[in-house]
Image (cartoon, helix red, strand yellow):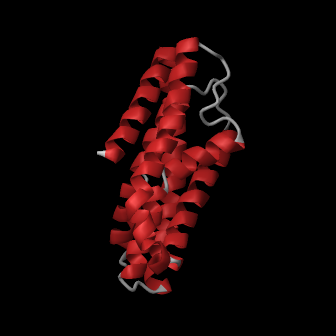
Amino acid sequence: MQIIEAILVAASLCADCLAVSLCSGVSLRDVRWGRILGVALAFAVIQAGLLLAGWAFGSLFVGAVEKISHIIGFLLLLYVGVSMLVEGIRGEDEIRNLDGLKNVIIGGLATSIDALAVGVAESMEGTDWAGFLPLLIAVFVITALTVVVGLRSGSAIGKRFGRWAEVIGGVILIGIGISILL
């Protein structure tokens, strides 16, 4: 896989990471770089890890991934979106959408199911390690960058528009989840 192609595939895989981090960022009241980088690193590791797992075990996963990936993605995004929506309506100060390791992992998994499918596809196409490595690196780096941008931008929006931005973010995530099913 050429570098330009790897970057384009990585950018398309990271679109949902940007959406989730942007929507989740609206609820962040205390945006510290350590926290942002931790969430970005977790998302990048999960996304790249699932891509690698899909590539490594492609022939084993091909049937299962194609059949249930949309359901898994929907359920995970529904969980994150409903949590944001409920907490935005309640007006709670401590939001749990990306607070805590469990919710970061759920958010990372929700946005990375498609990376598993791409890894399977790369495996099925016979892509060797040398051809796969640029994609793996691009996915890791671009995922981390999009999450940083999403959390920082979302936080700025949240400070300006408060809990209404959080409610809208929750609705958007639920909508993304529903679109996966359709």
The percent position of residue 73, horizontal first and vertical second, equals 45, 49
Q: Quadrant of the N terminus?
A: bottom left
Q: Quadrant of the C terminus?
A: top left
The percent position of residue 140, horizontal first and vertical second, equals 53, 62
Question: Which of the two residues, 137 or 171, is positioned nearer the viewer here?
Answer: 171
Specify the farthest residue to the left. Answer: 182
User: Is residue 45 left or right of 2 when viewed as pictured?
Assistant: right
Q: Residue at x 64, y 40 (%)?
A: 103
Q: Residue at x 58, y 52 (%)?
A: 43
Question: Which of the two residues, 145 or 112, is positioned nearer the viewer here?
Answer: 112
Does 80 appear above or below 84? below
Q: Residue at x 58, y 58 (%)?
A: 46
Answer with the quarter of the image where residue 50 lies: bottom right
Answer with the quarter of the image where residue 11 lies: bottom left
User: Is residue 144 left or right of 39 when viewed as pictured?
Assistant: left
Question: Which of the two residues, 132 or 32, is positioned nearer the viewer here?
Answer: 132
Q: Residue at x 56, y 44 (%)?
A: 107
User: Is residue 60 left or right of 102 when viewed as pictured?
Assistant: left
User: Is residue 4 left or right of 18 when viewed as pictured?
Assistant: left
The percent position of residue 63, horizontal first and vertical second, equals 40, 70
The percent position of residue 53, horizontal first and vertical second, equals 55, 71
Does 117 appear above or below 151? below
